[in-house]
Amino acid sequence: MKVLVSACIMGTNCKYNGKNNKNLAVINFLKDKEVISICPEVLAGMKIPRPCAEIVNGIVVDENGNDVDSEYNKAVSMALSKIQNEDIDLVILQSRSPTCGVNQIYDGSFTGKLISGMGFFAKALKQRGYNVIDVEEV
């Protein structure tokens, strides 16, 4: 079984704040599987750390009010290109991210409020027929 997983879940310090979302339950689940670890933001050359970003009216904006939508769209395109020839059985993505959020994302107010929704990469993968789950579903 081949599994695509958000790099931050595997312990890579690639989050906007320079930290990770290491998840031992996922790491243990993946022990006997072929793993492709990916961070679309890193692929696109985004800085670590970088300002927090949320989706506001369908556009990614950082906490300083800057429109960073094109960078996030570039990140998704680069990630999709990287995996285009892979036969991926399952995708496990990090919760709440404007890129990888599967079930919920932040509402764009930068107050920590969650809403139903998907990040750009999660949505693109789902639209292409991938089996995508949230890290909290493992």
Image: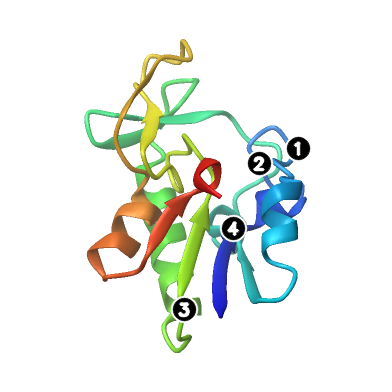
Query: Is disc 1 in contact with disc 4, using a CB cutoff of under 8 Å?
Result: no
Q: Nearer the viewer, residue 70 or 39?
A: 39
The label number, if any, that marks residue 136 in the structure image: none
Q: Which SS class for mark 2? A: loop
Foreground: disc 3 or disc 2 = 3
Choose the circle earlier in sequence order: 3 or 1. Answer: 1
Location of residue 124 in the rendering, given as x and y in whole percent from the top left corner:
30, 60
Choose the circle earlier in sequence order: 4 or 2. Answer: 2
Q: Nearer the viewer, residue 122 or 13?
A: 122
Amino acid type at image mark 4: Cys
Q: Which residue is mark 2?
A: 15
* Distance Cα–Cα, label 3 vs label 2: 24 Å
Query: Is 13 placed left or right of 72 in the picture?
Result: right
Q: Which residue is mark 1?
A: 19
Q: Residues within 10 Å of mark 1 (few under 14, many from 20)?
A: some
* Distance Cα–Cα, label 1 vs label 2: 5 Å
* Distance Cα–Cα, label 3 vs label 1: 27 Å
Based on the displayed image, in which of its 4 quarters is residue 42 positioned?
A: bottom right
Residue extending furthest top? 111
Amino acid type at image mark 1: Lys
The image's colour scheme reads rainbow
Q: Which SS class for mark 4? A: loop
Amino acid type at image mark 3: Ile
Q: Which SS class for mark 1? A: loop
Amino acid type at image mark 2: Lys
Q: Which residue is mark 3?
A: 88
